[in-house]
Image (spheres, rainbow, N blue to C red):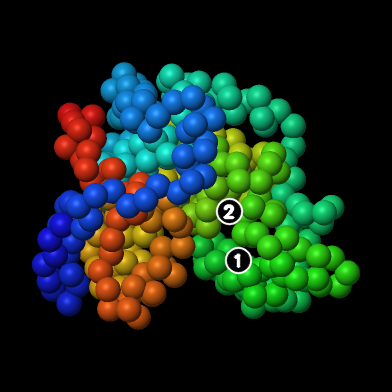
Amino acid sequence: MGATSSAGAVTKLEPGNVNAEQPRIPQASANRTRALNTTYERKYQRVLRLLRTDKTLIANIKATAKDFKIDPVHIIGAIVGEHTYNVDALDRAQTYVIKAMSYIQDDIDFEYDGESVDAFIQRPDFDRCNTIKSSLNAWICRENVWDQTFRGKSVQGTTFPNDRFSAVFFQPFFAGQTFGIGQMNPLTALMMTDRVARATGAEKLDHRNGKQVYETIMDPELTLPYIAATIAQSIEDYRRLAAFDISNNPGITATLYNTGRSAERARALQRKSGAPQENYYGWLINDREAELRALLD
């Protein structure tokens, strides 16, 4: 992977991997794949078949990428990475809608120990967040308050889990579960709702309406803008905060889609004066980029 300086002292990353060999794949991914009695390569080929045969899905990916001014291969990379390392692809996009309906027939409440997330963020600890207009910055603020004040601590007689805000309040079926073709986390979708609304005119998501959030992240057509918004935000964060243009490197955007917290990671990179590197997930996307681009022909 090469890098060139461009106007405004932004370094442009070229396509390709930094690492000659794939970085280590986490044990949790290996365990999930073993439990499904399959291999990473089989899962990769299965999601490739889905994308090759579903022309409507590919057309929607291209249109969504245009709305968010990103290369559609970034969306392909996020979908392929998720289905290679985290879940197994279903046979066609419509199957995701059918699966969604089995989960969201009833109302879904975002809560912990009987306290709704809406009531939780009205606590005085969150006062500085509740005046922030941007959905992204407001939820990042709340996530930070959670980490600093509640995570793994006992507050007013309640002991809170030492776990991510999203896992505690936003995964009502079971912890660690994400859904849909983009395996979108509900909290990520809430963060991105302003950006999606600006780009597409879609109705904004509301944390008080869990069913609306889950319908959105589980329906392929509705969730594609949220995948694209997440990627566009990571590209923007790295340009603004770390002075790197990662828009030509789908392995780096895939890595950030996998890890999350792109602004935090961009700031850390800037402090270290380092350069972006792909993880195991992004490495595969760069390694197979030509094959993935062919899906868009």
- Number of numbered tags placed on the structure image: 2
First in sequence: mark 2 vs mark 1: 1
The foreground one among 200 and 43 is 43
As drawn, 221 above or below 257: above
Measured from the top left, where is residue 286 in percent x and y? 23, 46
Q: Residue at x 73, y 60 (%)?
A: 161
Secondary structure beneath dot 2 equals helix
Q: Residue furthest right?
A: 157
The foreground one among 106 and 184 is 184
As drawn, 102 above or below 156: above
Instruction: Tell me the quarter of the image containing the C terminus.
Output: top left
Circles 2, 1 touching at the beta carbon (< 8 Å): yes
Residue that badge 1 annotates:
143
Alpha carbon of mark 2 to alpha carbon of mark 1: how far? 10 Å
Left or right of 233, for residue 137: right
Tag 1: amino acid? Glu
As drawn, 58 above or below 114: above
Q: Residue at x 75, y 71 (%)?
A: 153
The foreground one among 81 and 75 is 81
> Could you classify mark 2 by the number of other residues whose Cα lies within 10 Å: few (under 14), some (14-19), or many (20 or more)?
many
Residue 187: mark: 2
> Could you classify mark 1 by the number of other residues whose Cα lies within 10 Å: few (under 14), some (14-19), or many (20 or more)?
some
Tag 2: amino acid? Leu
Q: Residue at x 80, y 71 (%)?
A: 154
Asked whether the viewer can see residue 24, the reply is: yes
Instruction: Tell me the quarter of the image containing the N terminus.
Output: bottom left
Left or right of 148, for residue 49: left
Asked whether the viewer can see residue 51, the reply is: no
Measured from the top left, where is residue 83 in percent x and y? 42, 34
The foreground one among 78 and 137 is 78
